[in-house]
Amino acid sequence: MKLPLLVEIPWAASFIVQLALCGILVAFGHFRRLPFFTAYVCLNVGQGLLLYVVFRRYGESSHAAFLAGWWSEAITLLARVFATVEILHLVLSAYRGIWGLAWRLLAGTSAVVTVCLVLASWGNPSQALMNADRGFNLIFATALISCLALIRYYLIRVENAYKVLLAGFCFYACVKILLNTVLYDFLYHQRVRYPFTWQMLVVASYLIVLIVWSAALLRPLPEKKKQQSLPTSMYGRISPEINLQLQAINRQLMNFFKIEEPQQ
Amino acid sequence: MNYSAAVFASLALLLLLAFAWLALSGTRGKAEVVRDGRQDGDYPHISHLPQIKQALLNSDFTYLTGRGYPALAKRIRKERRRIALSYLACLRIEFEKLLQLARMVAVMSPNVAVAQEIQGLQLNLEFSYRYYLIYFRLVSGVAPLEAIGSLSNLVSGLTIRMETAMSELGERAALGAELLPHNGGGLDAGG
């Protein structure tokens, strides 16, 4: 079965860019610093090859294509989680306290969003896989954006290469949620158009991410800096004091209104 | 579009917007505030405090009204409001300096207490809420002049307390002065 040209072109382009990205990761030695990210890109190359062969041989609506598609998707999604945590760790490993806070935030956000999604999808088994994929991307994007917000809140500098990699993951997850939701709702019943449109748009958005990643990784990765730290006891002494001061200011602001009310 | 699809699509759009905001909004300005605060540690409004307090005294306003100068009284009322607003702005700057000092200490610490950090964030949100509430009341003229006068006392007390706290904390965190080669951070601050 031949795939439409509009699907084949972005698919072929993304395959070529993924191979180029693999080459960059190896040639610049990034695979040493980013082993999980490298594995993620390689798994995506493998997934692309596998699906291309299966789709051409059995057709994209066949049971074989269904199994190959969802199983390979599950594996690459898992690899994406590892790759993202790896990059976040590289960004925050110099700040041990904040890294401790970040992984708690990642775990907490993921747990809360998972519970919400399970409750929202309860009693709808026909769309279980679609909900799972969309839900995963939602959990992933929420957890990642929470971590990026944490990084911003503490004014931590993120090196350009890592920034681009994280931004790519985030953008792709958000676009996939949108496509899975909007396209499914509008086009699913027109069965001829839905799979091709979905594939074309997903592959095209991934292609954009791949190009940006490749451009960012064309330079050597920044050296790991050892961050000096304060003695452990200092945080315990200073932080509560600052919070007390902040609390005092808030109390004063509150009192400001309490003072004026009887006088009105 | 059904209800669940609308919710998912809205969530995705919200996440995209949050991501765009994180990627595009600047943070260097805030870092500069911290540096300024820690290096010079002076509060320009402190030196003018007696004059500002005098300008906010209610007696001037009642005197002018009693003497039959309503236009002048009105102008003075406006000016007093402006003074109160600039005080509020100073208060906000000092709150932010203290908050950023707390963040810097957390960034430099090998162990960070979740409860302390959540409390800091909560206080920040509380402050922002109250700040804007008072701000809009002052701008709209709902707050009475007595309240503006009490704001003066509030700020003067706080300024002195903050100065003491900042210098004390600054001394303790003196180590940190050399420990922060970065702190121009955020998603937009890299390479």
Image: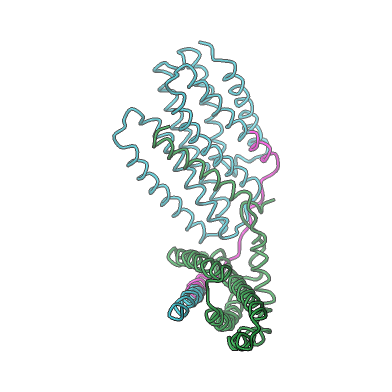
What shade has chain A been given? cyan
Depicted A212 relative to depicted A6: above or below: below
Q: Residue at x 59, y 46 (%)?
A: B20
- Whether residue A229 is in magenta: the answer is yes
Q: Is residue A78 above or below residue A92?
A: above
Q: Residue furthest left?
A: A123
Percent of width and height locating residue B61: 61, 84
How does the figure colour the protein chain or chains? by chain
Up/down of A163 relative to B162, above or below: above
Asked if residue A41 can be seen in this view, the reply is: yes
Which residue occupies the foreground of this view, A96 or A111?
A: A111
> Residue A223's x, y, as percent?
66, 51
Residue A233 seen:
no
- Residue at the limit of the structure toward the top, as seen here: A1
Q: Please state which of residues B175 and B87 is positioned toward the viewer in this rendering.
A: B87
Tell me what residue is drawn at x 56 percent, y 63 percent.
B107
Which one is in front, B77 or B39?
A: B77
The location of residue B122, given as percent across then percent down, is 46, 65
Q: Is residue A24 left or right of residue A54?
A: right
Q: Colour of chain B?
A: green
Which quadrant of the figure has residue A211? top right
Q: Does the magenta-highlighted stretch encompass residue A178?
A: no
**Where are the magenta residues, as a range?**
A211-240
Q: Residue B21: x, y in percent?
A: 59, 49
